[in-house]
Amino acid sequence: MSAENSSRASLTAKHGVRAWLTAAGDALTSVIFPSGCRICDALLTDSRRVPICGDCLSSFERVPSVICEVCGRPLPGLSQEQAQLRLCPACQDKTYAFECARSFAIYTGALVHAILLLKFEQIEPLGVWFAGRLAELVQSEPVRFAADVVVPVPLHRQRERERGYNQAALISKPLAKRLRLPHKAVLLMRTRARPDKHVLSLEERWASVRGAFATCPGSQVDNLRVLLVDDVLTTGATLDACARALREAGASSVLALTVARAVRNPLPSSVKW
Ligand SMILES: [Zn+2]
Ligand SMILES: [Zn+2]
């Protein structure tokens, strides 16, 4: 065996040993320090890196199949046939600047806890798990979601500095990797922080994000199809404001993906641009 071959073989062996040690370490850790599911406290017996049990993960309520073609809002009471190419009232008014928005599950029950864990405890394996679910959405409609770049909804600089990370990027980064697309967190920035007030009315929510995003100076957006990623879609106002900034800078389309979708919010029909 040549010296080069033998060093390559030893590198491969080292890699294998390292992978084995990581797996063994995980298993050992779960035996020595048995930990509970961060949502229901059930004992986690396997060596999963996502600190949530299988029952909680499978309890997330999927978005129903009958939805608004543009914004993904569930359209209850319509048959699949009636709802084909149906638009919700907001999309009939052409409210949103994004091409379409889709979400993995409804923002309720265990998913609310899971999103909070991601947001405040930076649980990266959970971001990877969510990215896997969003990748499945993309792969189920490859033509609709054909994109050139993946971009997270940005936090304001100061907020990101305080928190130390952007929770949307914990999802968008592994998603870009799964889809083999470039991840460009620096493409978009938030130029105005969210007001400190905890609860915003629907109108305040729209007003607080209107014009609050811009593309970064020098960033190349022309003719790009952007896959925009966030944790939760509440009113769609944030994704809309991001999409406007990207489209004004020349993006050819903006496709929005979020892990969760709030459905109890009223439609922003009173909003005038
Ligand atoms: Zn659980
Ligand atoms: Zn809609």
Image (spheres, rainbow, N blue to C red):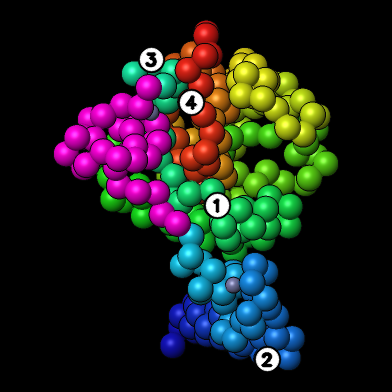
Q: Which badge, 2 or 4, is on the more N-terminal residue?
A: 2
- For image coordinates 31% across by 51% down, the residue present is 139
Q: Estimate the spatial distance between the alpha carbons at disc 3 and disc 4, rounded to whole Å.
A: 11 Å
For the view shown, which residue lies furthest in the front direction? Answer: 77
Rendered residue at 61%/24% (across/down): 202
- What's the magenta region? 61-89
Q: Which mark is residue 267?
A: 4
Q: Nearer the viewer, mark 3 or mark 4?
A: 4
Q: Which mark is residue 141?
A: none
The residue where tag 2 is placed is: 31
Q: Is residue 31 left or right of residue 61?
A: right
Label located before the other in sequence (2 or 3):
2
The Cα atoms of the two marked residues, 4 and 1, are separated by 18 Å
Dots 1, 3 in contact, CB < 8 A: no
Residue at (77, 25) in percent of width and height: 195
Which mark is first along the chain, 2 or 1? 2
